[in-house]
Image (spheres, coloured by chain):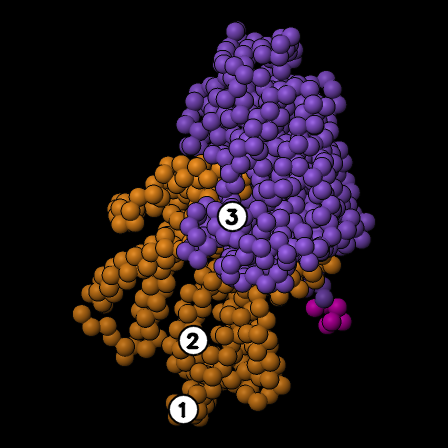
Chain colours: A purple, B orange
């Protein structure tokens, strides 16, 4: 009897405590409880909000949420009109006329006009590689009236639509915002895209909130990649930055989050085994992994040393070390991204698939004079294991190697140094690059002149072919130029292709409508 | 007493200056460049250089340091070079989770550690004592993140009664706030429970052997008043010191806990800033942590006179 009494007392106390706690919580329950909210975990934390100021992919994700673009790439990387309704091209291909479609408004209610468009394009051209190429070929960019603007070329440029549909913009901002110095961040985040950035709820390093833009008028076509009708089916998207993958996995399993952009490969079996969660590849193109030698210092100032690296590598070894699961990587015998229109093995890219160490040693020994090669090893970056393999290959070739461990932030700083490797410079780094590597204009590793990326190759022939490629409007002729360029690059070896990877995402089973696209968009997604 | 406090506070000024110089020099002499991080992986070298100029990172170090220290003296901690937000605003955004976690953790550690240690001392050598000491060794040995994952597995994934991650502000209700802090508090608190329990046990055992305890027993006092008013009070100084050190140690403890449980606190703000080389945020945060450390130590020193009236602070 006493035990029964004690049980009743304890149970009553617990009930009272729970009731009080529920009351305390319920008094301030959020008013938005009825709203459909998609809780997502992006691959990185959003720190910069200006897609012109930085090339960070996470900022590009943000830009696609709040801004709209004139043209956009569909899932086959074909440029399609987005904000543009009608457009015409003169017979000689030197003049373009664009008319904005009806119903375009900024988040503050102002209509989008061509003055906004022209200012946004000019700011973007000042920073973007492809935009810069377009600017160089442009004679004038003029707003004819509020809805029509005209682009006149000074020299042939066959990539006008592709460039305006480029994944990194131009994103259209209000004219006053777009007049900000391209080397300063914008402070006004008004766009005309499908979501409104909720600045009041932004906590850098933790949370970004986007509300549905009720005034957004989607195109009639179905969503396809970054193109088509961007129909928003949730009221709000919340990005939470969860730096710890184990925590993100547990949160996905319990339903605290609905979508996880980039789970590590080793956690995918857990996602796939859970009936409430799914995994899949959303970006069909993924990333290529490259080895970049420093062309300024021995031995890689000689093409034989760079060619030796092409013969030494075996892509499957690199991919296995970096990714493991063969479902998420492929070999790529091209210096351009595979599965894209410019993929070609002209020039014999197959040599990078199987290691020929005898040939590699022969080439290296012909130019190597005992220099110490500094390989930067980013221990906190997915490309980290590739540095270990490269160091091993170099040692097998008899090269003196200094493998320097560092974090990725240090690597990105160090690689800008033009000092000699023994004086704070470097010899080799590895990185990943996205679908920009489908074009020799936006591919960081291809440029070989004043605009060359870190590593600084100098080759006038490459630059001439890039310009010729960009000027050519016909796709078949452009591919022929690409083959010529690829052959030249296989000889000069500006970088070494190590393979191509795809990065799967994970989501709850009650989430549907994810798009196959090289950009991460949250339109078309439903949460049941 | 007031003079002592003023002297101690004045003594922190050179400490803070030396810390400021050290932090600044360590950060700026390191190999990383925030301009390169900001520009992104595919930026052109000349863009990185232009951003460096725009951020003022190309100026001589003494000018950069002078600008920063002048701002600090005027109450301006600067702005994040990434988000462009004032560091003070970032800190205000992040202070609530860290303060909440600190308060719940220390409360939990004191409420469990002191009684457990006292009781273990009273029953020294008993099964309970051995159990407390075994648990304390485990508490010391188990890293915060391991315990965190185990607790998440048990209470969030299996039992599904507590959230895996995230922080609910107290303005959203007492229970949601407390619920979001239970697992982080347990994970982070275990080491402090162990620390305090061991220190309490050792101190109380030493006191229990004194003559005045024997006197208290012989005059007929029951055990609880002896333990609380005679033993515990006289054992308080090392315990309070341990608690003070514990609070200071929490500064490093919250970093791991905030990462595992995705709490948007000051610890994560600092780590994220370090990873990205966000100089103004790192400098400000380390300065704030230094001030907190100094103040906690001062408070601990001052509290001694409460427990032992023989301790006087001279003018």
The image quarter in which residue A320 lies: bottom right
- Give the residue at mark 3: A301
Secondary structure of the residue carrying tag 1 is loop
Residue found at x 69% / y 20%? A474
Q: Residue furthest left?
A: B315
Residue found at x 48% / y 50%? A297
Camera-nearest label, 2 or 1: 2
Residue B170 in picture, x, y percent from top left: 52, 48
Tell me which chain the residue with mark 1 is part of: B
The image quarter in which residue A218 lies: top right
Q: Where the N terminus of chain A falls, by quadrant? A: bottom right
Marks 3 and 1 sit apart, C-alpha to C-alpha, by: 81 Å
Q: What residue range appears in magenta?
A: A1-6
Q: Name above or below for residue A63 compared with residue A179.
A: below
Quick one: label 3, few (<14), some, or many (20+) residues within 10 Å? some
The answer to whether A30 appears left or right of B75 in the picture is: right
Residue A63 or residue B101, whichever sits in front: A63
Residue A510 in picture, x, y percent from top left: 77, 40
Residue found at x 35% / y 60%? B290
- Give the residue at mark 1: B210
Marks 3 and 2 sit apart, C-alpha to C-alpha, by: 66 Å
Is residue B115 at least partly visible in the picture? no
Quick one: label 2, few (<14), some, or many (20+) residues within 10 Å? many
Q: Is residue A5 magenta?
A: yes
Residue found at x 62% / y 39%? A489
- Give the residue at mark 2: B239
């Amino acid at each position: 009897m006493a035990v029964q009494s004690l049980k009743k007392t304890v149970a009553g106390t617990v009930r009272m405590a729970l009731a009080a706690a529920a009351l305390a919580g319920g008094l301030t329950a959020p008013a938005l409880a009825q709203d459909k909210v998609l809780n997502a975990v992006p691959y990185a934390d959003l720190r910069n909000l200006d897609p012109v100021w930085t090339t960070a992919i996470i900022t590009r994700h943000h830009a696609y949420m709040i801004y709209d673009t004139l043209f956009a790439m569909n899932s086959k990387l074909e440029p399609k009109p987005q904000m543009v309704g009608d457009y015409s091209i003169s017979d000689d291909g030197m003049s373009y006329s664009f008319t904005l479609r009806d119903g375009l408004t900024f988040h503050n209610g102002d209509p989008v006009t061509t003055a906004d468009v022209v200012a946004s394009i000019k700011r973007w051209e000042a920073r973007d590689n492809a935009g810069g190429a377009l600017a160089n070929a442009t004679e004038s960019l003029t707003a004819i009236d509020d809805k029509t603007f005209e682009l006149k070329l000074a020299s042939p440029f066959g990539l006008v639509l592709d460039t305006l549909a480029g994944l990194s913009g131009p994103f259209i901002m209000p004219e006053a915002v777009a007049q900000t110095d391209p080397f300063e961040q914008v402070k006004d985040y008004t766009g005309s895209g499908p979501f409104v950035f909720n600045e009041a709820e932004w906590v850098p390093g933790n949370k970004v909130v986007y509300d549905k833009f009720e005034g957004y008028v989607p195109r009639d076509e179905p969503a396809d990649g970054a193109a088509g009708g961007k129909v928003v089916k949730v009221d709000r998207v919340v990005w939470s930055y969860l730096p710890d993958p184990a925590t993100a996995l547990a949160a996905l399993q319990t339903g605290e989050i609905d979508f996880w952009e980039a789970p590590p490969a080793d956690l995918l079996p857990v996602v796939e085994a859970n009936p409430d969660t799914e995994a899949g590849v959303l970006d069909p193109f993924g990333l290529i992994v490259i080895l970049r030698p420093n062309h300024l210092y021995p031995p890689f100032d000689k093409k034989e040393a760079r060619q030796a690296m092409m013969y030494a590598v075996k892509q499957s070894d690199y991919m296995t070390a970096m990714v493991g699961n063969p479902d998420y990587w492929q070999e790529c015998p091209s210096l351009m991204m595979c599965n894209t229109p410019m993929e070609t093995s002209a020039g014999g890219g197959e040599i990078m698939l199987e290691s020929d160490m005898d040939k590699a040693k022969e080439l290296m020994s012909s130019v190597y004079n005992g220099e110490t090669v500094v390989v930067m090893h980013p221990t906190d970056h997915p490309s980290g294991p590739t540095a270990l393999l490269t160091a091993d290959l170099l040692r097998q070739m008899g090269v003196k190697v200094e493998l320097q461990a560092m974090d990725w932030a240090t690597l990105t700083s160090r690689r800008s140094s033009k000092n000699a490797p023994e004086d704070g410079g470097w010899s080799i780094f590895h990185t990943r690059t996205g679908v920009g590597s489908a074009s020799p204009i936006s591919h960081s590793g291809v440029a070989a002149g004043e605009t060359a990326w870190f590593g600084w190759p100098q080759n006038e022939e490459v630059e001439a072919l890039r310009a010729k490629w960009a000027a050519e409007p016909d796709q078949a002729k452009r591919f022929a130029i690409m083959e010529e360029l690829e052959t030249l690059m296989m000889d000069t070896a500006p970088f070494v292709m190590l393979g191509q990877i795809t990065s799967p995402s994970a989501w709850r089973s009650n989430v549907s409508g994810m798009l196959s696209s090289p950009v991460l968009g949250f339109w078309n997604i439903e949460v049941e | 007493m007031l003079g002592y406090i003023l002297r101690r506070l004045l003594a922190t000024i050179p400490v803070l200056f030396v810390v400021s110089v050290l932090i600044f020099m360590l950060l700026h002499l390191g190999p990383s460049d925030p301009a390169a991080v900001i520009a992104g992986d595919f930026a052109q070298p000349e863009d990185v250089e232009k951003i460096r100029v725009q951020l003022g990172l190309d100026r001589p170090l003494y000018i950069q340091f002078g600008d920063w220290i002048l701002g600090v003296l005027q109450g301006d901690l600067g702005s994040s070079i990434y988000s462009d937000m004032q560091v003070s605003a970032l800190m205000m955004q992040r202070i609530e989770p860290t303060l909440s976690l600190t308060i719940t953790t220390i409360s939990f550690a004191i409420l469990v550690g002191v009684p457990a240690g006292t009781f273990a001392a009273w029953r020294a050598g008993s099964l309970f004592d051995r159990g407390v000491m075994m648990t304390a060794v485990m508490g010391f040995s188990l890293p915060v993140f391991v315990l965190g994952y185990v607790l998440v597995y048990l209470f969030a994934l299996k039992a599904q009664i507590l959230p895996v991650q995230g922080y609910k502000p107290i303005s959203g209700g007492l229970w949601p706030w407390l619920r979001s802090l239970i697992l982080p508090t347990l994970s982070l608190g275990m080491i402090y429970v162990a620390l305090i329990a061991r220190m309490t046990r050792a101190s109380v055992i030493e006191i229990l052997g004194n003559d005045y305890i024997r006197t208290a027993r012989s005059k007929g006092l029951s055990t609880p008043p002896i333990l609380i008013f005679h033993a515990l009070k006289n054992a308080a100084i090392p315990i309070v010191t341990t608690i003070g050190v514990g609070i200071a140690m929490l500064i490093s403890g919250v970093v791991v806990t905030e990462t595992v449980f995705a709490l948007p606190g000051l610890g994560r703000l600092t780590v994220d800033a370090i990873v990205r080389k966000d100089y103004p945020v790192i400098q400000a945060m380390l300065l704030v942590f230094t001030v907190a450390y100094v103040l906690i130590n001062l408070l601990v020193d001052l509290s001694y006179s409460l427990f032992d009236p023989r301790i006087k602070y001279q003018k």
